[in-house]
Amino acid sequence: MSRKLGALVLAMGILVGAMGIKTALSSNSKGTVMMANGPAPLPFPPPRPDSPPPSN
Amino acid sequence: MPGSIDLSIWFLGTAFELMFVVCSLARRSFLRYFFLNLYLLISTSVSIGRFLILWRYGGQGSNQYMYFYYYSDALLTLTLFGALISLYSRVFGELRTGEYVKWGAVFLLLGTAGFSYAVVAQSAQRLSTGFAYELSQNLYFVGLVLTYILWGAVLKLRETRTRLVQIILSLGLYFSGYAASYALMNLSWKFSIIRYLCPVLGCFLPLSWSITMLRNSEEARLAPAQLVAVPR
């Protein structure tokens, strides 16, 4: 049980650190972070969740 | 359709990805580095799929390409996370900490998925696309932190297995390169620079892994600095 608890605490610490770096990097940006796998050309970023739906 | 430079980088990167798998098979290390091979095999398949969709629906601006790109990117990031955890298992294998690594990876993945869901939950539209994109981006930063911790562990444990050390160093440079490119993007929003930088980084990882696989055997060891230093 203590091993699992230790792993959980460590995992949460790593998650907090990672999200902290992401927030620090994106603080002055236009709100999109482009991290992508592979050598394919990047598409345009997807619409943000808080953006209004497209009008038909 | 992308220009000739984009296509050249793309084809070259896909060739490097296949080259690593071929090198692993030739050096009889396919199963030993199974998760790295799996990641690059899926990446090659995804690359072909992306090309076919780009060809069929035309242009990077098409919705089909965008959706396929971000869903496949989430799949690739999950596979890369698995590959990173497999490297953890190898580095910490002798310390009998397999249980810690296994549970840590599960908690981290669940935590990242939960956090990503919380970010996109308020949006009823495009929930799955938003979730795939957010999970992919968040896992990248988790991977970045995990790789730095692994670098520290390699130094602390005085890891001497050349292949393993070089593979981890390449992964660290890859993640750092992306973080640096993102910082660059913040300095100057010029899509043309990032357009080439990200795919070039995508070529770097399979190329460096292939060179490592070709140049070093599994038995190769790095000489610790203390041993090679000449006493006065």
Image (cartoon, rainbow, N blue to C red):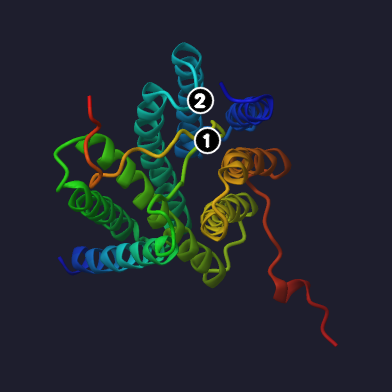
Residue at point 40%, 39% (across, down): A45
Residue at point 62%, 60% (across, down): B160
x, y (%) of residue A47? 32, 39
x, y (%) of residue B159? 57, 63
Q: Amino acid at mark 1?
A: Gly
Q: Secondary structure at mark 2?
A: helix
Q: Are marks 1 and 2 in contact (CB under 8 Å)?
A: yes
Q: Is residue B191 left or right of residue A3?
A: right
- The chain ID associated with circle 2 is B
Q: Amino acid at mark 2?
A: Ser
Q: Secondary structure at mark 1?
A: loop
Which of B94/B52 is in front?
A: B52
x, y (%) of residue B81? 39, 46
x, y (%) of residue B218? 62, 45
Query: Which residue is denoted by mark 2 in the rendering?
Result: B47
Residue at point 61%, 28% (across, down): B10
Q: Is residue B6 left or right of residue A37?
A: right
* Residue A56 position by quadrant: top left
Quarter occupied by the N terminus of chain B: top right
Q: Residues within 10 Å of mark 1 (few under 14, many from 20)?
A: many
Which of B81/B140 is in front?
A: B140
Which of B19/A38 is in front?
A: A38
In the rendered view, tell whether residue B185 sits above or below residue B192: below
In the rendered view, tell whether residue B92 sits above or below residue B117: below
Q: Residues within 10 Å of mark 2 (few under 14, many from 20)?
A: many
Query: Which residue is denoted by mark 1 in the rendering?
Result: A38
